[in-house]
Image: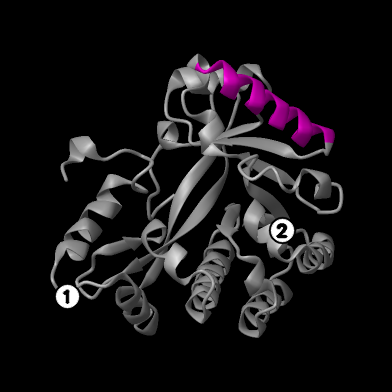
Amino acid sequence: MTKATLSSTDIADLPVADPLLYALASRDSDVVALVRDALAADRASLAFHPIVTTDPVPQIAFHEGLIRLHDDAGRIIPAAHFMGLVEDTAMGREIDCVSLTHALRHLRRNPTLRLSINLSARSVADGEWRRILDGGLRDHARLGDRLIFEISETSAMMLPDVMIRFMAEMQPKGVAFALDGFGAGMTAFRHLKDFFFDLVKIDKGFVRGIDQNPDNQVLAEALITVAHHFEMFAIADGVETEEEAAFLRSIGADCLQGYLYGVPRFTF
């Protein structure tokens, strides 16, 4: 597979994914084993992807922290290649624990940083994950004001009562919540009034080529209208061109995220 045949829908970013393609092509490679070994050896880090405002000169509103695991040769395993395999297992809970641990560490060290990380609803009921979160929020005053949990529609609807209670518990501590992939499943609309989401991330499928796609234009504008009705910020995810960005600004998107503003990096 050459660089020319890879698209943003296939990989997280080329510098991260190319080494994994090599690793997976080797005779002894196995994704789950690579993940298990990386977790056991504490070979993990966060890559930071900026979310920017729709101002004429975009400003960074916050960063999304994307978990990256490293194999024993230093190559990086993007989450897109393993989360689907382990998300519903104990290993998925461990990954959420590692991601939260790194996020809290970065927030402690960088008092101006505002950071979001992905969260599975299953981890909310995980004792170790809660211990890490409660300790981080207890030991560092107002750290929760700079922490955002991103939850997919599928995950939110898997355990809606659990998520609603958790969000209500976190709200006084300043923790914000983003609904990831907004509109992709269309199942959470009737429940939006019950949740405590502060932001929605409009699914990439509605953003790609929006400047030339009338269907996506109508749907994205409707999603932004719904978000604003429920007093939530609307973030357009997957922005890759200036034309897409300009159209999204014109229909009221609050923030933008995508390769137009850079690939995930280990520094911010």
Q: Which residue is identified by label 1? A: 28
> Mark 1 packing: few (<14 Cα in 10 Å), some, or many (20+)?
few
Of residues 230 and 157, which is closer to you in this image? 157
Q: Which mark is residue 46?
A: none
- Circles 1 and 2, Cβ within 8 Å, touching? The answer is no
Q: Nearer the viewer, residue 87 or 145?
A: 87
Give the camera-side residue of 141 and 87.
87
Residue at 79 percent across and 62 percent down: it is 167
Q: Is residue 13 left or right of residue 84?
A: left
Q: Which residue is mark 2?
A: 157
The residue at 57%/53% (across/down) is 113
Q: Which span of residues is magenta-colored?
A: 213-229
Residue 94 position in % (x across, y down)? 51, 78
Residue type at the position of mark 1:
Asp
Residue 54 visible in the snapshot: yes
Q: Which structural element holds mark 1? A: loop
Say if 232 sits above or below 102 in the image. above
The overriding secondary structure of the stretch rendered in magenta is: helix
Q: Position of residue 13 (x, y in %)?
A: 33, 46
**Quarter location, residue 230:** top right
Write the residue at 68% across / 78% down. 130
